[in-house]
Image (tube, grey):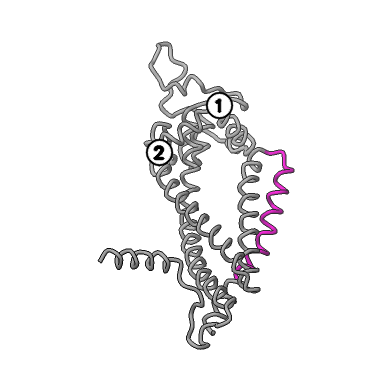
Amino acid sequence: MAIYRFSNAMIGSLNLITLLASIPIIGAGLWLSRSSTICENFLQTPLLVVGFIVLVISLAGFIGACFNVAWALWVYLLVMMCLIAALAGFTIFGFAVTGQGGGTQVTGRNYREYRLESYSPWLRSRVTDPNYWNSIRNCIVGSKACAKMANWTPLDYYERTMSPVQSGCCKPPTSCVYNTGTMVVQNPDCIRWNNAPSVLCYDCDSCKAGALEGVRRSWHKVAVLSILLLVLLICLYSVGCCAFRNTKRAETEYPYGENRMRKIKPRWDYYWWRWLHDCKERLY
């Protein structure tokens, strides 16, 4: 009985906490839906989806554990299993598509430059799609990352560090050569570059590579949290299985400890084994 109380009390308490935590998550998603900036709108759908999933799971787990509702705990475990599988797949997929990249150090400078070919084909297909890139481009322009470099001196470009977006979008590649009387074969980004603040190198491959490098770095920071969350969900799922078994046991007229009866009905595979046994008896 002590194990029964412990597992059900733990599931009930944890799900009450996550139930309350889902409310501000949903509120943040609804608030972002009213924002006009594209960068914030990127977060709207994931926040709402996560918030509603956490709300449903927490509500089912809390009701099932605290009120001994077996079907609610069954729904809780089913959704939890799907969530664990989805998170594991998402984590593995994230490592697979962000394993490449990193850029190369520019000689004599404190920044790195990035090439689009260095990243996975799946990421490249995203940023080369005009529909995706227009949204990302507007987000980069709205972040004013390049505006912070407007007053830099030539010496600053040698001594200061740059973010991947600043290195790829706010300046031409370092290898570019301008104001020469002879035609020199150069990187196509050298031609795309323009001094106009609204143009710069926002349509360059180096800018797309810089955006992907930002995604790669952000993913590596999130990866640790994803792994910890996956371990936590597996632990919760294990405790939930114990609570589900205890809830089913509490529904019977003979709970564990009374007459030492664990079940009043045969296990699901009892009839199959009985049928096979009877077939064997008839053969011999």
- Identify the residue at image location x=55%, y=82%: 255
Residue 180 pos. (x, y %): 43, 15
The residue pinned by badge 2 equals 103
Taking the magenta stretch, the answer to whether it contains residue 24 is: yes
**Res 199 quadrant in image:** top right
- Residue extending farthest left: 284
Q: Which class describes the residues within 10 Å of circle 1: few (<14), some (14-19), or many (20+)?
A: few
The residue stretch that appears in magenta: 14-37
Q: Quick check: 230 above or below 267?
A: above
Q: The N terminus lies in which quarter of the figure?
A: bottom right
Residue at point 61%, 53% (across, down):
50
Question: Vertical placement of 233 versus 133: above or below?
Answer: below
Q: Nearer the viewer, residue 36 or 153?
A: 36
- What's the amino acid at mark 1? Pro
Q: Which residue shows up at 47% across the image and 54% down it?
A: 85
Q: Mark 1 — residue?
A: 130
Residue closest to the far right: 34
- Res 168 visible: yes
Foreground pick, 228 / 70: 70
Nearer-N-terminus badge (2/1) = 2
Q: Position of residue 73 (x, y in %)?
A: 58, 66
Q: Is residue 168 left or right of residue 144?
A: left
| Residue 112, horizontal then vertical, whole percent | 42, 39
Instruction: Specify the quadrant of the image occupied by residue 111.
Output: top left
Q: Residue at x 65, y 63 (%)?
A: 59
Residue 134 in the magenta stretch? The answer is no
Marks 2 and 1: which is nearer the front? Answer: 1
Question: Under tag 1, what secondary structure?
Answer: helix
Q: Amino acid at mark 2?
A: Gly
Q: Position of residue 206 (x, y in %)?
A: 47, 30
